Amino acid sequence: MINQERLVRTFLELVYIDSPSGQEARISTELSDRLRALDLEVSVDEIGNVLGRWEGVGQPLLLSAHVDTVSPGIGIKPVVADGIIRSDGTTILGADDKSGVAVILEVLAVLHEGGQRPAVEVALSVGEEVGLLGAKSMDAGWFRARQALALDSGGPLSQITCAAPTSDKFSATIYGRAAHAGSNPEEGINAIWVASQAISQMLLGRIDEETTANIGVIRGGHAVNVVPDRVEIRGEARSHSSSKLDAQIGAMRAALENATTAHKGARLELEIERTYHAYRLAENAPIIQRVARVLDALGEEPPSLRKGGGGSDANILNGRGIEAVPISTGMQAVHTNEECIAIADMARCARFVLLALQRSMDE
Ligand SMILES: [Zn+2]
């Protein structure tokens, strides 16, 4: 049985270990020690991903979560009140995704206490929040599991994100020419003006039901009396349809190129990168069926499938032939200082994962 007190204690202990993206060494060591103490065979790769395995009964099921957190995430002071865990308001909480990690540790602890052990694999990734870096560099050949629960989502437990988009990001630098803005502006090329003309020709926000686009960063200029010679623009587009994504990114590229060529002497440097690939799981996909059976056995609502707009380690796992479905741990308001999690929701997720593993022994 899930020990709710121990689950909360584990969660809080993890939250106290600072682990912003890129600084995961301490938590990786802590987690590999904890997995070894639970008799898992553990492998830590050079960037700090922690992989673990139990030989056991049945086909292995992979449990995935990420160990890094977004900013501000240093010196988090969790506050527990009325069954809800929050930060003190000056940082995020880090339930994204330490709630997923805590659930995995609790479920393994329960199974470790006695009885038959199911075959389990664990993937705890680093750098998820900065482009799924850990999952991308994991040795996919290490895994024997063909199905995974990615414990890194919010919302009701029964709400299943069965599809996620492909995402491209770009970084553009427009070079103009500096000049004194008052005495000889005609000798300058205003890079900010070029950029603004490019952006004004772009469609942004929700493009259609499957496609979104954004300019998220713009940086340039030094002083009000200097014609700026350089501006940097960073943006992205996502779509569940790769042809729509190509069209959107193509249009953003054309806007940048057209605006730049319209200003003689201006120059554009553009880098476009695919961040991750889409996935789509059909309603009859084995992993969805499996989730549905476990929800049913727990007396939960039947799964309601929805398309998500974000990327997660599930995108990478699905791309590598491991059917992975994001599962809600109960985390709320992630990536804000209001982030919180209800203890009851986290425990509910743990009961779900425990039963999924117990049942995997007969499947
Ligand atoms: Zn997350």
Image (tube, helix red, strand yellow):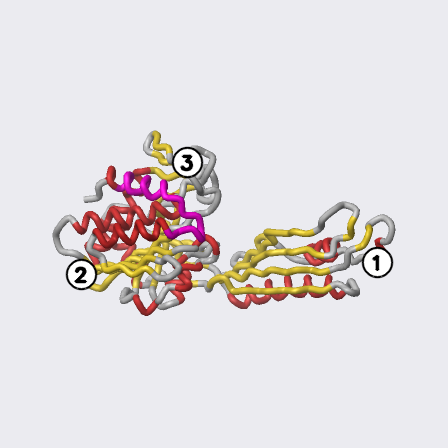
**Residue 87: mark in rendering:** 3
Q: Amino acid at mark 3?
A: Ser
Relative to 114, is 128 on the left or the right? right
Q: Secondary structure at mark 3?
A: loop
Residue 115 lies, with reference to residue 344, above or below; the image says: below
Residue 165 in picture, x, y percent from top left = 48, 60
Residue under the point 32% across and 33% down: 83
Q: Quadrant of residue 18?
A: top left
- The quarter holding residue 334 reads top left
Task: In the displayed orientation, state which residue is furthest to the left.
Answer: 115
- Name the mark on residue 187: 1
Residue 355 image label: none
Compared to residue 275, the image places residue 222 above or below, namely above
Between 18 and 301, the one lying in front of the other is: 18
Region in magenta: 7-25
Q: Which residue lies at the image location 47% right of the left edge and 57% below the top edge?
A: 131
Label 1: element kind: helix
Q: Position of residue 302 (x, y in %)?
A: 31, 50
At label 2, which amino acid type do we have?
Gly
| Quadrant location of the N terminus in the rendered image | top left
Identify the mark at residue 56; answer none if there is no mark.
2
At a point 64% along the width and 62% down the height, the residue shown is: 252
Amino acid at pointer 1: Glu
